[in-house]
Image (cartoon, grey):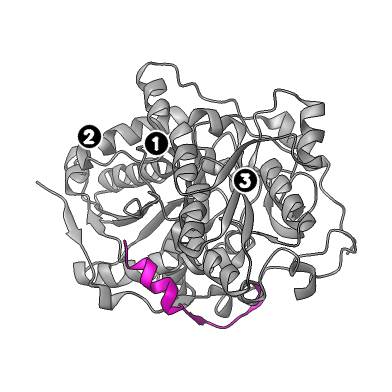
Amino acid sequence: MSQTKIVLQEKEMPRQWYNIMADMPKLPAPPLHPGTLKPCGPNDLKPIFPMSLIEQEVTARRWIDIPDEVNNIYKLWRPSPLYRAHRLEAALKTPARIYYKYEGVSPAGSHKPNTSVPQAYYNSKAGIKRIATETGAGQWGSALALAGNFFGIEINVYMVKVSYHQKPYRRIAMETWGAKVHASPTNLTESGRKVLAADPDSPGSLGIAISEAVEEAASRPDTNYALGSVLNHVCLHQTIIGQECKKQMELAGDYPDIIIGCSGGGSNLAGLSFPFLLDKINGRELRVVAVEPSSCPTLTKGEFRYDFGDLAGYTPLMMMYTLGHDFVPPGIHAGGLRYHGESPLVSQLHHDGLIEASAYQQTEVFEAALQFARTEAIIPAPESAHAIKSAIDEALKAKEEGKEKVILFSLSGHGNFDMQAYADYLGGKLKDAEYPEEKIKEALSRLPRIPA
């Protein structure tokens, strides 16, 4: 029994992004200026973002046109395929029908170019020639390096140190596309030097790397900042995934009962689920599950509070689920999920009960990844394997209950650059990280106090 591949024609690609803020029962609380603690205005963000992206960040318009220049690049890999996982279903002996939307077909190997391309485009239109950014496992840095190459923008990447050493081929991919890559924390920024002074062996974190990139962008008039997840405009750009998927599910004659995505900052989950959540908001029965690491359990163990998006407190305060901006997660291989916070949009939807969350240890995640690779042939990224683990559990639950559930998950990227992680697992060297409860409690105790 083989896979079923469901594809759209180029002419069927979405021409607009979907903005869930037009339909949410309750909008997130506004971001606050880190100095005044008053709601941020456009002028507060202009030093690091072009106005076009600031407008997308705050607008409640339901549909935003995708520029032709962006669509012409999207066409290099979009529409991306949807697969029916017949072999995995057979191995599990489940009555569930399992589908996965595969974003690993992009040149960078993940879903991240869906937002890196428009971000580079809008910066280019604003005359920006240089962008500073961070990256965890390297998917975002690779995607922005690719997009910067398309639009003639210099890209400077602060890559979380533990991933810099775990995943050298992602660094090489960035450098191949012309980016400069630094192992964060570095001695290049004040925020990096402070971290190294306190802990010379710091493994780094996305919060630290964001501080370094934002500091650089704010201190140089020729440089803007770009973020690969969390923010509203990033989630907006990713909705091309879910829109395509809705059309593909129609072609398959099916509709999901459960939608699953791994979630670090939230953009991958948002991209797949937001177009379907519109149906749920309008009364359709549907579960959406965010899956995260047990060692960085933002939605499952964090608090719904205002917090900074970075370690140093340069970013606006956002109302989100957080583990504390100075929490440094263990150095697991799913580097893209090692973020202390969560998208304000995903956070609000979770808080309102429209999204649920679960967490897994990395050894059980890699066990699921191997089962998937040996049935469906694709080696998944460690981040994506979290969604696979959840999908397998839901399929086995359907088997126990004797129900024909339809499960849809996001295979957000391939694991071809993650072979060291697989080598560690196959060699018995991969260990589960302890849930750092005390460290999280300490970090949460240091959250900023916001007056009512």
**Residue at the (41%, 69%) spot, across then down:** 240
With respect to residue 183, does 316 lie above or below? Answer: below
* Image marks 2 and 1: residues in contact by CB distance under 8 Å: no
Circle 2: element type: helix
Separation (CA) of disc 3 from disc 1: 26 Å
Viewer-nearest residue: 448 or 176: 176
- Which numbered disc flags the more N-terminal residue, 2 or 1? 2
The residue labelled by disc 3 is: 298
The spot of residue 351 in percent (x, y) is 62, 60
The residue labelled by disc 2 is: 374
The spot of residue 396 in percent (x, y) is 30, 42
Provide the residue span drawn in magenta.
Answer: 57-77
The residue labelled by disc 1 is: 417
Give the side of residue 263 with respect to residue 436, left or right: left
The spot of residue 325 in percent (x, y) is 74, 45
The stretch drawn in magenta includes residue 418:
no
Q: Residues within 10 Å of mark 2 (few under 14, many from 20)?
A: some
- Which numbered disc flags the more N-terminal residue, 3 or 2? 3
**Residue at the (39%, 58%) spot, across then down:** 259
**Residue at the (34%, 35%) spot, across then down:** 368
